[in-house]
Image (cartoon, grey):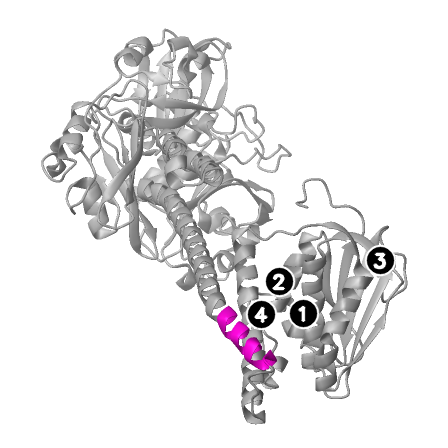
Amino acid sequence: MGRAAGEMRRDSVALDWSDDTVGPWRGVPPGLMAELAARVADAPAAVWVRIDGRCERVVGRSGAAVAGWPESWRVADGPAECLLRMNGALVVEDTSADLRWGCCPLRVSADIRALLAVPLRGADSGITGAVYVVDTVSRRWPDSVLEAVERLAAWASGATAGQAAPWGAADAGGAADVPEVADTDDAHGKIAVASSGPASDPFLTALVETLDVGVAACDSRGRLILYNRALRELRGLPDTWTPSEDLATSLAARPVLGPDGDPLAVERTPLGRALRGEVVENTDVVLTAPGQRLRIAAARAKPIHDGDGRCVGAVVALQEVTDRRRAERFAECELQVARALAESVSVAAAAPAVLEAVARSLQWPHAELWLIDGAGEQLDPVAQWSAPGLDLQVELPAVTSFEGIVGSVWATGRPLWVPDLAGSRYLTTGEAAARSRECARQGLRTVLAVPLLDAGRVQGVLACFADTLEDGQELLTTLLGTIARQIGQFLARRRADELALDLARTKDQFLALVSHEMRTPLTAISTYTELILTDDDQACCPDHRMLLERIDRNTRSLRAIVNDLLDLAALESGRFTICREPIDLVAVVLDAVSAAATAAATAGVELLTALPDRAELHGDAARLRQVLDNLISNGIKYSPHGGQVHLRLDADADADAGKAGEAGDMVLTVSDTGIGIPEAERPRLFGRFYRASTARTHGIPGTGLGLTIVRAIVEAHDGTIGLVDTAGPGATFRVRLSSGPPATGTPD
């Protein structure tokens, strides 16, 4: 409920909105004033406004609850109407049940459920602005909270110190510019807070102590006069510590480092630079503390001037950004790891570069990588990296048990965080206990080990060692886990590739073995069958001759399959070669057609040719004959009785469109009127052992190897082969060959 005008505190809050040289409140940005108001009221958000005639204008805000508020609104649409009518503070515990504010459009749009409004007054005690503290849930506003917000408003005007109001007597309806809204974490705001003499104002001291940003100030001689709670925590100082030394003495005990890790002299620190008149913006420094990890802080600093412009001191604000910078370094680390893995044939080869990138990103002095051996029985150390100056004397042993740091990660498949190696059980357990003791002796403290996983199975362990007592277990585990996943995925890919190569080699060896072992008995069967059939002295009855002829045909078919298997094995192993020499391709085509004539006649298929007189090129006649035999045989097999197989050879022309082809090209087209090939299956047609569904449906025999070998032969001749789209039935294959000599380096 609102406080009556007679009950309201009257601290002569005199505001001059026209002075925007340093901001409206002693140089404190309005955004920071809003943050302070929210803090002292333990509320999620606050807004400082200027009341300008019939309009309220935002000059500072803090908190997500008011982020969507407009820059200005009519007085009638906001809390100011009540403030002006009551001439005092407005306290609303539940806006939905309070008629003074319940129907306000601003409340409805922002979903505000509780409000504390304190007026700001000009020199004539008229209301010229207000601070609104809000909450998104209904709540009580104790008198102590109201008093704290009113004191903040009073302090902002200088009235708490009994000073004259620094703004003069601005008219509430004046045309002064509204000060720029500043970030709530603006270092200049903290500077102004610190420079206003906190030691003389317990209330202000309490405000500075509540800030999450570290704040320090010194006088013109460099003597520290302010050191708030957040900065004491950053520097590892006890809560009871008070500043009583100069900046040089402080740096001697706790050096401040630059981004490169070198200690900064007094005059090069942000506070020292500000004391010399420089304004410092967003400069990273590294803060040290005995026995604690290094912390990175973004520093902003500025000098403090008196009314005559003389420098009377300096102030610095330090925002810890350790986790942010570490995440940024790890993003770069991921790229370095990816690059190292991409350029290496194995994890072991990439490991030194990977470990160095990881350790430097962590700023830790030591890292190790362990991988499961081929039998899966032990973890072998494959690499380690140590910072210069760290010399670990004990060698890394293989780990065969589920004990020790690495063994524990192997056993559980989960990350392991050891806060302090020096006092841990890992100095006495596991095969690597001696190594752990050596690490502790060399000053290594916190350890983080993460598993390298593949489908949930541990494939290795990545372990990193710090030389300080670290915190941030969750973040560090997440960051290092990302690198571990990269390595684990690389391991999985490499092992899959190696397995595929092993399978391919095994398959080739099997094909070659089977083919060679089958060739010998097939040769004997074929030879003896032919001898019996051609021996006039061993006349056979018609039934026996029919059986022998069937044996002979099937033997020839089986021998053709064996030859295809041998060719396939040669292709896979890289031993497939051709011997190119000048030949007449027309003669090769005619020989193939002649050889297929009997089979075509038996199947009732007509062979038709359209050939030039000669077509000279450099090629392997036997291999090209193999191409023709396969294409013609397929055309006969897949064409119905009465069908046709056409062979056409064109020199220097496109077979379909009649356009001029590339100079020296020969285009061979083989088409049939058979069952055709479904369009969806055409991309797989030249794959090993693939047979079209139409062939299987019609029960046409075959191995699915012919077209694979045909393509290999054509490509070995620097040519191409493909299936041509046609409007009619059947299939049309086009082979393009160069008639010129082979390219340099092509085997002859």
Q: Quadrant of the N terminus?
A: bottom left
The numbered mark, 4 or 3, whose residue comes first in the sequence reads 4
The numbered mark, 4 or 1, whose residue comes first in the sequence reads 4
Residue at the spot of label 2: 709
Residue at the spot of label 3: 615
Q: Is residue 656 above or below residue 445?
A: below
Q: Are marks 4 and 1 in contact (CB under 8 Å)?
A: no
Decide: few, some or many residues near mark 3? Use Cα within 10 Å; few <14, some 14-19, many ≥20: some
Is 533 one of the magenta-colored residues? yes
When asked about the image quadrant of residue 210, the answer is top left
Q: Which mark is residue 630?
A: 1
The numbered mark, 3 or 1, whose residue comes first in the sequence reads 3
Q: CA distance from mark 4 to mark 2?
A: 12 Å
Q: Amino acid at mark 4?
A: Ala
Q: CA distance from mark 4 to mark 1?
A: 11 Å
Residue at the spot of label 4: 560
Q: Are marks 2 and 1 in contact (CB under 8 Å)?
A: yes
Q: CA distance from mark 2 to mark 3?
A: 23 Å
The numbered mark, 2 or 3, whose residue comes first in the sequence reads 3
Judged by depth in the image, the label closer to the viewer, 4 or 1, is 4
Q: Amino acid at mark 3?
A: Ala
Q: Is residue 147 above or below residue 504?
A: above
Decide: few, some or many residues near mark 1? Use Cα within 10 Å; few <14, some 14-19, many ≥20: some
Q: Which mark is residue 27?
A: none
